[in-house]
Image (cartoon, grey):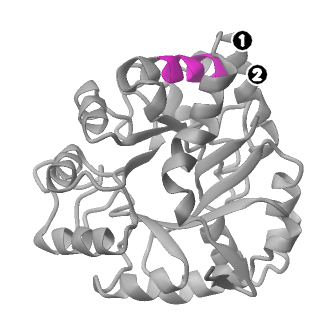
Amino acid sequence: MKIFDVHTDVLYDLYISKKKGIENRFSDVHVKQLKNNVIKGGLWTLYSPDKFDLIEAVKIALAEIDMSKLPGFELMLGLEGLLNLEKVEDLDTLYELGIRHALLTWNEANKYATGVAGPADRGLTLEGKKLLDKMIELDMIIDVAHLNEKSFFDVLSYTNKNIIFSHGNVKELCDHRRNLTLDQLKALKEVDGLFGLTLAKNFVSKEKDKQTLEYFLDHVDRAVEIMGIDNVMFGFDFMDYLEEGFNDANLYEVNSAFDAYKIIDGLKKRGYSDEDINKICYNNFMNRYSKHLIKLWGGKWLKD
């Protein structure tokens, strides 16, 4: 069995490491973690917690990647937040660089939409609708994670094209601002969107004794109950490799990509069939979006 991890910040890590003068980050950290791992593919994102040149950042990150060191690994590229997207037309340039996915915000309110840290009554903007039109034109994956509830529902009212929620959990089990309510989960199901569950411990539970693999699997069970087995996936959001302060952000038992096999073992113990485990871990996402995979060579993607 294999896993496609629909959210990890590898691009951001490569970009910020290079800016700090750290060399060989890809080989020393990411290849070491992902080689001979149950994670056989991933959507690697670049997130925008502050202002920088987005196009330059993507180029810097891509130049650090040498996929010959991860033979057979299935790669997709995305953006976690568009704070630094200067204009909608820049998506064309980013698409040419290999970007196939984007979240509209990373918690903040920006020119396109409003994240969970923004005003509750502010939603998708007119510029945000233009952005969605461009993403639809390019057949990009539209990720509604990090949006506040108004923006979330605004996006789903505007389009049902290529909708995913890449990383979060079930709010009724953990009242975190980034987790989804029952109404949101039902709305996501109505547009046949995919729901990705995360291993960020504060999203699993606010109680330390419940920040466990078993309680995470309770989120999986509840997500499957609400969404159906065909609409659930994993966006682990491993943070062990990021800057100091993030290295214990995930569950202690599953703190890095090295531990991902425990998810499969846990699902088996819960009684999930091999077919259903394969759906959640890999097929639900890849059956829809394998066409968005890219092949990188020398920092550029190869067009088949």
Q: Is residue 20 visible?
A: no
Q: Please name the residue shown 65% across and 52% down the image.
A: 245
Instruction: Tell me if label 1 and label 2 are in contact, CB under 8 Å.
Output: yes
Magenta highlight range: 211-221
Q: Quadrant of residue 283?
A: top right
Q: Which mark, by number, is residue 148?
A: none
Q: Is residue 217 magenta?
A: yes
Q: Position of residue 10 (x, y in %)?
A: 66, 64
Q: Position of residue 244 (x, y in %)?
A: 69, 57
Q: Is residue 289 magenta?
A: no
Residue drawn at 84 percent across, 62 percent down = 31
Q: Which mark is residue 269?
A: 1
Residue depicted at x 87% and y 54%: 35
Q: Left of 166 or right of it: where is 304?
A: right
- At 66% from the left edge and 63% from the top edge, which residue is drawn? 75
Amino acid type shown at disc 2: Asp
Q: Quadrant of the C terminus?
A: bottom right
Residue 219 on image: x %, y %: 49, 22
Residue 265 marker: 2
Q: Position of residue 179 (x, y in %)?
A: 38, 35
Chief SS of the magenta region: helix
* Residue kind at label 1, given as amino acid type: Lys
Secondary structure at numbered mark 1: helix
User: In what element is the residue under mark 2?
Assistant: helix
In the image, is 266 to the left or to the right of 47? Answer: right
Q: Residues within 10 Å of mark 1 (few under 14, many from 20)?
A: few
Q: Nearer the viewer, residue 299 or 86?
A: 299
Classify residue 61 as left or right of residue 39. Answer: left
Whether 68 is drawn above or below 201: the answer is below
The answer, for residue 114, to whether it is visible in the render is: yes
